[in-house]
């Protein structure tokens, strides 16, 4: 009986030590600013020479093991940039651990708008 308790305690400690931290990241921005290219690069996917517009969003996950042994699962939500999807964008900010905003640096008006919104 004592042996089972020690084994159970070890199993619980082992499970806690090997727990994976889940980080959800939303990638937002206008159409054709490079959101999908950034997501593809992060997930080590080849870049598409003729990318298609993202419809609603594309979900990808990547498990990273750090030298300490800690594991983090990054899940990215590559969102559509078209105007017709803007109404649902608030859903991609809520409950996220991080938000990456991608914009065209040559569009000063858009930059000011983003600064005002954040």
Image (cartoon, rainbow, N blue to C red):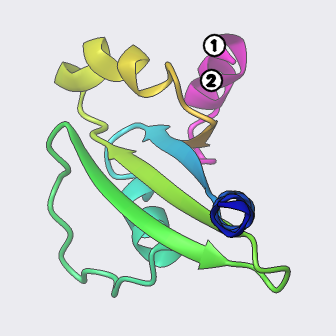
Q: Is residue 93 left or right of residue 60?
A: right
- Eyeballing the image, is 39 above or below 107? below
Q: CA distance from mark 1 to mark 2?
A: 5 Å
Of 36 and 61, nearer the camera is 61
Q: Which residue is mark 1?
A: 117
Q: Which residue is mark 2?
A: 114
At x 52%, y 72%, the residue is: 63
- Eyeballing the image, is 51 above or below 103? below
Q: Which residues are magenta?
A: 104-118
Q: Percent position (x, y) of residue 29?
A: 45, 38
Q: Percent position (x, y) of residue 20?
A: 60, 60
Q: Are marks 1 and 2 in contact (CB under 8 Å)?
A: yes
At x 30%, y 52%, the residue is: 59
Asked which quadrant contains residue 89, the reply is: top left
Residue 104 visible in the displayed image = no
Residue 31 visible in the displayed image = yes
Q: Is residue 13 left or right of residue 43?
A: right
At x 17%, y 21%, the residue is: 84
Q: Magenta includes 107?
A: yes
- Eyeballing the image, is 55 above or below 108? below
- Eyeballing the image, is 89 above or below 108? above
Mark 2 surroundings within 10 Å by alpha-carbon count, few (fewer than 14), some (14 through 19), many (20 or more): some
Of 65 and 34, nearer the camera is 65
Q: Quadrant of the N terminus?
A: bottom right
Q: How many marks?
A: 2
Report helix, strand or loop for mark 2. Answer: helix
Q: Percent position (x, y) of residue 2?
A: 73, 62
Q: Quadrant of the C terminus?
A: top right
Asked which quadrant contains residue 15, the reply is: bottom right
At x 54%, y 61%, the residue is: 73
Of 14 and 34, nearer the camera is 14
């Amino acid at each position: 009986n004592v042996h089972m308790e020690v084994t159970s305690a070890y199993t619980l400690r082992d499970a806690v030590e090997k727990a994976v931290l889940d980080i959800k990241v939303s990638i937002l921005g206008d159409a054709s600013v490079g959101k999908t290219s950034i997501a593809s690069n992060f997930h080590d996917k080849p870049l598409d020479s003729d990318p298609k517009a993202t419809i609603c969003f594309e979900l990808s996950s990547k498990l990273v093991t750090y030298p300490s042994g800690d594991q983090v699962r990054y899940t990215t939500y590559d969102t559509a940039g078209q105007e017709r999807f803007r109404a649902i964008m608030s859903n991609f900010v809520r409950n996220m651990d991080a938000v990456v905003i991608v914009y065209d640096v040559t569009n000063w008006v858009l930059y000011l708008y983003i600064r005002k919104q954040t």
